Image (cartoon, rainbow, N blue to C red):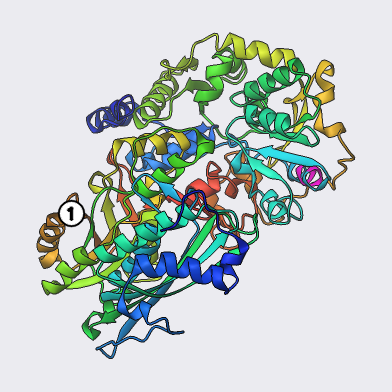
Amino acid sequence: MIQSNRKILLSHGSGGTQSRHLIGELFYRVFDNEILSMGSDSALLEISPENVAFTTDSFVVDPLFFPGGDIGKLAVCGTVNDLAVSGAVPKYLSAAFIIEEGLEFETVEKVAHSMAETAKQAGIQIVTGDTKVVNRGKCDKLFITTTGIGELDPRHWPVSTGQTIEPGDKILVNGFIADHGCAVMAARNDLKVEADIQSDCAPLHTLIREILDAGLRVKFMRDATRGGLATVLAEIVRERSFGMDIIEDEIMVREPVRGMCEFFGFDPLYVANEGKVVIIVHPDDAKKALSLMRKNEFGENARIMGEVVQDHDGRVVMQTRIGGKRIIDMIAGDQLPRIC
Amino acid sequence: MKHIDEYRDRKLVRILVDEIRKASRNPFRIMEVCGGHTVAIRKFGIPALLPPTIQLLSGPGCPVCVTETSFIDKAIILARHPGTLITTYGDLMRVPGSSSSLEKEKANGASIRMVYSPLDSLEFARQHPARTVIFLGIGFETTSPASAVTILRAKREKLNNFRLLSAHKIMPPAMEMLIDKTVQIDGYICPGHVSTITGSGIYSPIVQKYGLGCVITGFEPTDLLQGILMLVRQFESKDPKVEIQYKRAVRPEGNKKALHYLDMVFELQDERWRGLGPVPLSGFRLKKEYEEFEAEAFCDLTVPEAKDGKACICGEILKGLKIPPQCRLFGKTCTPENPVGACMVSPEGACQAYFSYGE
């Protein structure tokens, strides 16, 4: 076992015995699976279909631990969700760690356990990885990059591009928005906010799988992470020959999140999520999709929040809570830095 | 959300909209001079609710937008000066100076920290006695009292490594100047937060000299609609006056304590406003007793005179003569990511509010 009070040293990244220690004592033990324990330079995988989905993402969240999650959970969920919204079944993950010299061993251990637990929940294996240690001050505590491979049924190709979207299609989202960005912000000491907000960080592959397996006509899926819900919607309609009408009343925002956004002048529509997916389906399948989503633990508060329309091409128009109208466009710059 | 939802009630909104429609007969141009109002009007989609007789114009009320390029240039000289640490409100980071921005300087290694209160600067000053901490003070009567209190505290603590670079401004001279320039405005939605400090008296000259209605208004949809209704009624009955809609925050006499601090620390000087040019006695500078905190005297801050982009019509937009979509740069070469003119720089600027929330 790893003793407490131990710190990561530069030699843990040297490739020598200390590195072997870190990898052997920690990562091999925690991520334990047959492919990883082969210890080969590359993970050797058996993948059945002709099509694979392949994605990568880096995580630099500050702080490393926040209510509802941590950088490890985020690093697994982020990549699993990117695979899942492409219509793929997530299978394998790689994990690369850049660690700042002096970080407590215990911190890395906690993060690794969180990754292992989330991977198990997502039915995915962490089969290869890398560790580097950099001088104090050359990175901020811990950065993680995960890369994922998923099996893709060719029927789901159009889901990624949204090429089959047409007017009349319904737009769904699986619950409260803006939780993640606000939870991370509130966890930062410099803002001195006390708010009971949990990140929504969650793996969404089962929720998505249930809808795809039911044979519903899913036209498009995307997880609404950085840039929030608004950015996803604005991206879909950009340069397309249709628009979108959405209804603010159907977009759920928790009370403490609303409060925090009001106070800091953030717009929840642009605040990051880590467990929210926008799904566009054929109008006749919308109710079925909604009831399937609501049965899943990560979709209990799902809503049909709008529809694709023939009017105002390339624009998302929101009917505001007071009955006014507002255009939803992409945001310039970041409302909140380093939230994932 | 308690204390907010009441002001976003759809039934109340409908009643107010009906009243406005009934009351408004003649074409009526209303200017809001507070960036917070500009954003709220766009965010809640108010224009879609109003009758065609009423036109809303956005005035020069976004402090970032009216800050001269030369102020950013001076801040950059200070940021590059060895041993300095700059503290600033976040909005200033991306504002383009004539050749750089604070964001770029930070990436190049300058010490620049974002703060939510100028008082946080003093904490940096205490922690880093070998460095000079310089706060970039922008904003109107709303933010300037906080700068004044910071100066008073620095004086009391004898902190000799703190300075203020002030671009603080006051609102009424600019509002008067806009009318002087024969801008077609028929009434003002007066700034809610500024008035919390100043009280309502500062708008009396606008009513007396120019016969324009002034209603101090809050920031929620029912506030704005009620404020508009009050202005419409004044206009239709030819009875212009200063009224307070935002009674839950604004008292006629203002915040006497804050005014006292302002008076202790600052005095008025002529000040250039981006888009408007020089406005007499509209800027705050430190009084002689506090000149030790003056950042202008810290080192040589000579900067080239600012030139606004040729095709940019920010000046006319700030004056309410034109609306953002009438600019040929709008949304094309001038976007929130690459702002050409001042009004595109801040989320509270008229152009960025139009860009983000639509026409």
Residue B16: x and y in percent read 29, 27
Report which residue position mark 1 lands on. Answer: A297
Report if residue A329 is visible in the image: no
Report if residue B229 is visible in the image: yes
Residue B132: x and y in percent read 79, 35
Residue B265: x and y in percent read 74, 17
Q: Residue at x 56, y 35 (%)?
A: B184
In this view, B132 is above or below A173: above
What is the span of residues highlighted in magenta in the rendered image?
A: B73-78
Towards the viewer: A29 or A336: A29
Q: Secondary structure at mark 1?
A: loop
In this view, A219 is above or below B172: below
Q: Residue at x 41, y 58 (%)?
A: A1
Q: Residue furthest right?
A: B300
Q: Main secondary structure of the magenta part?
A: helix
Residue A258: x and y in percent read 35, 38
Towards the viewer: A41 or A218: A41
- Res B124 quadrant in image: top right
- Res A252 quadrant in image: top left
